[in-house]
Amino acid sequence: MDREASYTNSIKRAVSVIKNAERTTAFTGAGISTESGISDFRSPGGVWERYRIVTYQEFLESRESRMEYWAMKKELFSEIKDARPNNAHKSLAELEKMGKLHCLITQNIDGLHQDAGNKNVIELHGTNRQAVCVTCGKRWPIEEMQCILETGNMDPRCNVCDGFIKPATVSFGQPMPEREMIRAFSCSVQCNAFLMIGSSLQVEPAASMPREAKSAGAELIFINRTETPYDNLASVIFRENAGIVLRDILNILKKQ
């Protein structure tokens, strides 16, 4: 079977899985946003390659570490601020509007799923669109923090309690948000179809969600450029561009 015929059969299989599912859950990683110009964690030459990882404990204990962390975030803001949803984001939003997608779990912090129109989004790693005081919980738009950083203040403090301010994202060594994790695992085990897009599935505990979905009886559809540790569990695997695959799936579903 040639590559085109194989792709067509895979699309038909994926459409059948989603069409027949009572509940479909999507799970997205950094790979879905690379088409929007946002480099993923492992992209050569990306922001993450030019800065070391500052753990949450280091952030709390060291002013130098906080300044280093904010320097990286300042540069990342410039990369993210003009990013727009791509065809993959838009297709997932369309699936939700059609009633074919019931829950969207994302490891991403860029907010592009909400920009595309998805409503039921669970952000496992928080959001880069806000900053939060780690002591009292006060929040600010990230743009406000960016303005402060531009003045040369690379260790911003809360104007209420003088606590440390950091982006409302989950740093390495920081506990995962309990409410979001409970919701995400619930969506994973209650779905009939689990659609994974753009994740290497190497970061736990999020990476175990496809496995939990499979154990509960769901069929898995993977759209990812590279292999993952759980490829053997998937009913359908695509290595093609996520925007193209989701567009092709969506176009057929609209006709049925």
Image: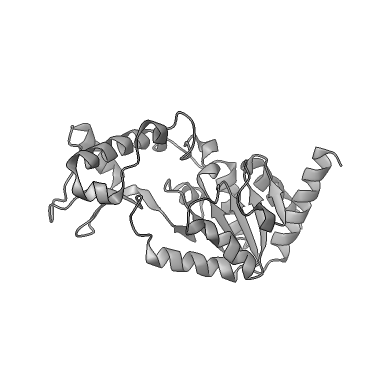
Quarter of the C terminus within the rendering:
bottom right
Compared to residue 27, the image places residue 128 above or below, namely: above
Residue at image point 73% right, 56% down: 15
Percent across and percent down for residue 41 are 46, 40
Relative placement, left or right, of 153 versus 193 is: left
Residue 23 visible within the image: no
Q: How is the image coloured?
A: one colour
Res. 245 image quadrant: top right
Name which residue lies at 60% across and 65% down: 213
Query: Which percent across, then down, holds residue 181?
Result: 44, 64
Side of 157 relative to 85 (left or right): left
Q: Is residue 115 left or right of residue 235?
A: left
* 188 vs 76: above or below: below
Q: Quadrant of residue 240?
A: top right
Regarding residue 34, the answer to whether it shows in the image is yes
Residue nearest the viewer, comparing 205 with 153: 205
The residue sitting at 51% across, 37% down in the picture is 36
Question: Farthest residue toward the right?
Answer: 1
- Residue at (35, 34) in percent of width and height: 51
Picture quadrant of residue 147? top left
Query: What is the number of callouts on the image?
Result: 0
Residue 176: image location, x then y, percent: 38, 60
Quadrant holding the N terminus:
top right
Q: Is residue 14 left or right of residue 154?
A: right
Image x and y of residue 166, in percent = 26, 48
